[in-house]
Amino acid sequence: MNDPRQFFLNDFKDNPFGEFSADGREFYVTHVHLPRPWVNVLANPHFGLVVSHTGSGFTFVENSQLSVLTRWQQDLADDTSGKFLYLFIPATGELCSLSPAPTWAPLDSYRCIHRLGSTTFLGKKGNVAWSWTLLAHPRETAELWLVELENLGPSPQELELTAFLEWNCGVAPSPRREFSKLFLETQFLPDSGLVLAKNHMWDVGSRRFGHWNTSYPFVAAFGADRPPAHAQGDKALFFGPGGSLRHPLALQDAQWEPAFGRHWDPVAALRYPVALAPYEKATLVFVLAAGKSRKEAVETWQRLANPEEVQKALEETHRFWDELLGRHSINTPDDSLNAVLNWWSRYQAIAGRLWARCGYYQQSGAFGFRDQLQDAQVFLPLEPQRTREQILLHAAHQFADGSAYHWWHPLTEEGLPSRYSDDYLWLAFVTANYLKETGDFSILEQEVPFLDAEAKTLTDHIERAFALAFSRFSPRGLPLIGCGDWNDGLSACGLQGRGESVWLAHFLVLLTQEWSRIFRELGEHEKASSFQEKRNQLIAAINQHAWDGEWFWRASLDDGSLIGSHHNSEGRIFLNAQSWAILAESTSRERQEKCWRAVKEHLFSPIGALLLTPAYTQPNPAIGYITRYAPGVRENGGVYTHASTWALAAACKMRDHEAVAYLLRTLNPALKDPRRSWAEPYVLPGNVDGPPSPLLGRAGWSWYTGSAAWFHRVVSEWVLGVRPTWDGLQVDPCLPSSWSKVQVLRQFRGAPLSITMHRQPGVARTQVLLEGKPLEDNLVPPEVEGPLSLEVLLPEEEIQT
Ligand code: GLC
């Protein structure tokens, strides 16, 4: 196979297209022409925007698919769609934009700074320099722009700055633009300079709102801190005959004939003259606000449209992220990993996955039942209350029979009832982890309504989920896969109710163990032992029926044939069926070792751990849509990063330091050579092309991936080994052997802990010292009071098993 060195940088500082700031919190994009857009997601829990290094992107309220304020065309090859600022210099006739798009005019200097909570474009053309910062207000439904223009020369400058966006105000994308624009209404308020937009028809599901018979529930307002000299509301009039987004002819016209109302192609183009004396600077701010009424939208704009407010919001946003993420930090010898884990991957999980629920590769807007539950684990060591809220939100999207929506849309509450075999079980998984972190058993008593029945306690919800799962077993005692399990693409294996899932069997082994412990804590001994019993039966069935000789097969199909078995020429071995055998301890140590050897032999590739191999080359309707992806892409034999993070945890359980080092390196986006990987170095991609893709090593689906929260969780809990358990906080590191020192700051049950790990000659196995005294079982007891400093002595060399 290809030489791995082709896919990775020797050092993350060798990135040819940009660099991290020294503290890792910022990424400076220095090249305009990248293989693909490198974006930032700027969001609060109810509002947000995505902006790429070209300046393209879109803005939404509450739901990034059903409630998108500004129009955006998903086109990653020509990233010229979004909200822009044109700069026209009438004296020379020069036209450029403050971001590379949409004019693509060459600039004398360019830098795009993506940081947690804001993006800034720095540029210069001739004697004019600028900075344009975009952010989502931390609390309001408003996007803010802070624009500074500076005259660098000795002569006065007469500039014209024109802001431009296209209204969408509803479902995105809008493929029927000619139809949907018929319902949009805009208005220009000359005194304030605001443009208002409203959509009289919201193209959402008919069950609740009637077919095409409801209005979009938000009014949008866009304007600056001053009225423009000219305003235009029609796209064709702004472009002019033969003009384009790249070069709107109206920019050269002295007068504009404004066209707002209900009969145009609705945009907002606002032109501001900016006269700069020699060396003078000017500041302008813009606000794009949304409100439930026109009044609310206008008032939000009024409150925020001044430089002090925008500056304040910017500082508050940066402080929020620093403070939140600073509650748990790690310091390893690998600076690139520190940058990704201390800042970006958790920001990705919170801003991208939980709040915006989108990236450039997917405008989702929906909550995935299993997805955002897993993501919400990111808050456990930071602000577990937010995990609690997410757990209860998902419980409220469960049916009384224990099943749940596969996904649902906030705002409309449309959802997809499903027969996925695992969705509803993630409630049990994340709740158990919440309990281990917090000890807050009161959550179990919390009453939550079902979608179709009155409120019951969370325990009741979870017991119903288990009861449903237990009712879906094959005669030989393995769980049925239905229309898929964690791997959505195995969508046809069990449609007729016979196909089985081995991954799900492992998952249930782990869950029954956890819940038997929870029932024991609750004094419900009968339930505890019946869950133990279930677990034993599952382990017996797995080992009797699912062992393939050298590894576990992955699933059986309705006709009884297997996938992930040595009999298969494609899809011969799957990662999750092995990694979860180790994580759940659902087989003997000997078999775990065999599984792990098979993973290393067949699935470890130069670009990372593949989800399965060999990739499917032909659609197979009996397996599902996984076989319809191009071979090597996403779940079909690529590196699926979400699953690779589980392999990393398994590597730690196997105490395989070399594999830990390999997985850390291949998962770390900052180390990927962007000429091969294309995607952003600061956030995790969902997948990396595996063989036989001609684009081996290409990363895709950046931002919108469940791996972001998992990567952090696995590194902190398994690699660094600081892991909440039922008996306290376990310290059980499994570091790459080249690491000699690591520091961790985190809280546990309210007590701040500072943990320093280092290698110590003569130490035979890891020892945790509290004030110089060894802690029993390397366990920080749950009732600790802080602050505490722990010292962890690591053996110089650990013997590999
Ligand atoms: C996608 C889905 C997620 C699923 C994964 C693997 O990321 O959103 O729910 O588990 O694919 O198929």
Image (cartoon, rainbow, N blue to C red):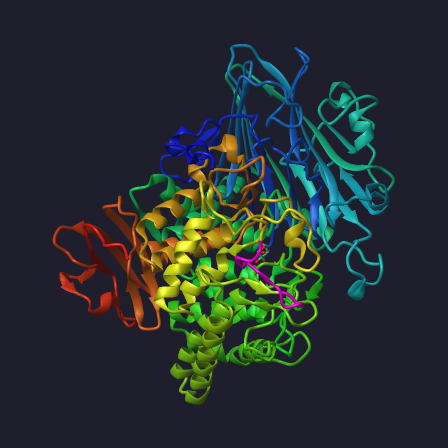
Residue at image coords 52%, 25%: 31
Residue 585: x percent and y percent?
A: 40, 68
Q: Quadrant of residue 344?
A: top left
- Image check: 723 left or right of 367? left
Asked if residue 649 can be seen in this view, the reply is no
* Predominant SS of the magenta segment: loop
The image quadrant where one finds the C terminus is bottom left
Examine the rendered structure and indicate whether residue 94 appears above or below residue 736: above
- Image check: 742 left or right of 237? left
- Image check: 692 left or right of 216? left
Residue 213: x percent and y percent?
A: 85, 58
Let me know if residue 567 is in the magenta part: yes
Residue 584: x percent and y percent?
A: 42, 67
Total labels: the figure holds 0
Examine the rendered structure and indicate whether residue 470 appears above or below residue 227: below
Residue 267: x percent and y percent?
A: 76, 36
The answer to which of 350 and 600 lies nearer the viewer is: 600
Extreme bottom residue here? 526
Examine the rendered structure and indicate whether residue 541 appears above or below residue 142: below
Asked if residue 728 can be seen in this view, the reply is yes
Q: Quadrant of ligand 1?
A: bottom right
Let me know if residue 298 is in the magenta part: no
- Image check: 546 left or right of 362? left
Q: Quadrant of residue 54?
A: top right
Residue at image coords 16%, 58%: 764
Query: What is the span of residues highlighted in magenta in the rendered image?
Result: 557-568
